[in-house]
Amino acid sequence: MKTFIYADKFFLNSGVKGAGYLDVTNGIFGTYTKEKPVDAEIIDQSGKWIAPGLVDTHIHGYMNHDVMDNDAEGIKVMSEGLLSCGVTSFLPTTLTSSKERLKDVAETIGKVYQEVDGAKIQGIYFEGPFFTEEHKGAQNPSYFGDPDLDTFHEWQEASGGLIKKIALAPERKGVKEFVNTVTDEGVVVSLGHSNATLEEAQEAVEAGASVFVHAYNGMRGLNHREPGMVGALLSLQHVFSELICDGHHVHPQAAEILMEKAGHDHVALITDCMMAGGMPDGNYNLGEFPVVVKEGTARLESGNLAGSILKLKEAIKNVVEWDIATPEEAIMMATYVPAVSCKIDDKCGMISEGRAADFIVLEPTMDLVATYLDGVERYHA
């Protein structure tokens, strides 16, 4: 017997549809119809909206576990916990560390990624270590260096080819060759933790870089005589910007400026969440640094922000409540755009016939009701 889900609104790849029925038989999306199917099981979500499962492409930890712990069981706990955030696909994200530690972490994720039982691991994001000290953020500058292809290929081999994205600072030596090579190999290059000029950022983009790491944060700001990294992400064509919409990292008006200038279809909502996500206030670590979590922020002893404790389901609600995105735009920025920006849109980010039925149920207030993975309800609020 076929299974259909009934709801008031559907955010489909083909556009937003009104009340109707979506085929989710055997964990796979089928067709949408307005007519009530006969001889079918109906999952009734009257008054609710159906959207693709959220895709978090920049996340360091959750539920007291950090990707850099190099702990397979911790990765599984993260995966399971993310279902409560509406996330059904993610990229475990590393931090700057030693070459050996990063290789070990890549190998661990490569071995365990198919064993996770919650949100699906669609690749690995290497945030660093090819950064510059002026905008180090919560990255350890003692491990910074210039891009090195041999080292990257060691990491990629250890991961089993799972590294989908790597971040670097455009002003480091050897960036052009590195970007050219890894993008030819199908790896997305993102730009951040950088004091680069507009010209340096533009050269990296022309070489193939296509994403800016957490827009506005960890980068040279906009100046009328030197537009810098922020000027680059606001003015260059065919690039995506990650954006943390927790109300602490970026002022809503600055977020709106980016969305207006780049287009909602080129902004990827991310969390940059660290291990304290889903946990009470207190003392935690981000990589090798102690972090204090209170009043909705995670901060180093210096007072600088150290990742976030944002849940992606909160980000889509925030941008709608701030009146800087429609519900459709908010959902797109947390599903389709991050997937496209990391070249994983063949696996996730949309409701489309023949795809795994990974989706969320929302109230019209944008509050999460339930998360479905492969057509099975795995979380209920």
Image (cartoon, rainbow, N blue to C red):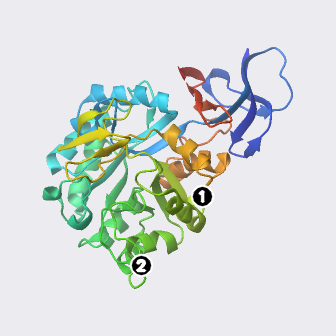
Question: Where is residue 250 drawn, in percent x and y?
Answer: 44, 57
* Label 1, residues with CA under 10 Å away: few <14, some 14-19, many ≥20: many
> Residue 331: which quarter of the image?
top right
Q: Is residue 198 above or below residue 43?
A: below
Q: Is residue 174 rendered to the left or right of residue 381?
A: left
Query: Which quadrant of the rendered structure holds the N terminus?
Result: top right
Q: Are marks 2 and 1 in contact (CB under 8 Å)?
A: no
Question: Where is residue 268 drawn, in percent x and y?
Answer: 51, 53
Hey, what amino acid is under mark 2?
Pro
Q: Is residue 250 above or below residue 317?
A: below
- The residue labelled by disc 2 is 227
Q: Secondary structure at mark 2?
A: loop
- The residue labelled by disc 1 is 264
* Label 2, residues with CA under 10 Å away: few <14, some 14-19, many ≥20: some
Is residue 236 something that shows in the picture?
no
Q: Give the residue displayed 27% in from the left and 42% down from the top.
A: 106
3D distance between C-alphas at marks 2 and 1: 22 Å
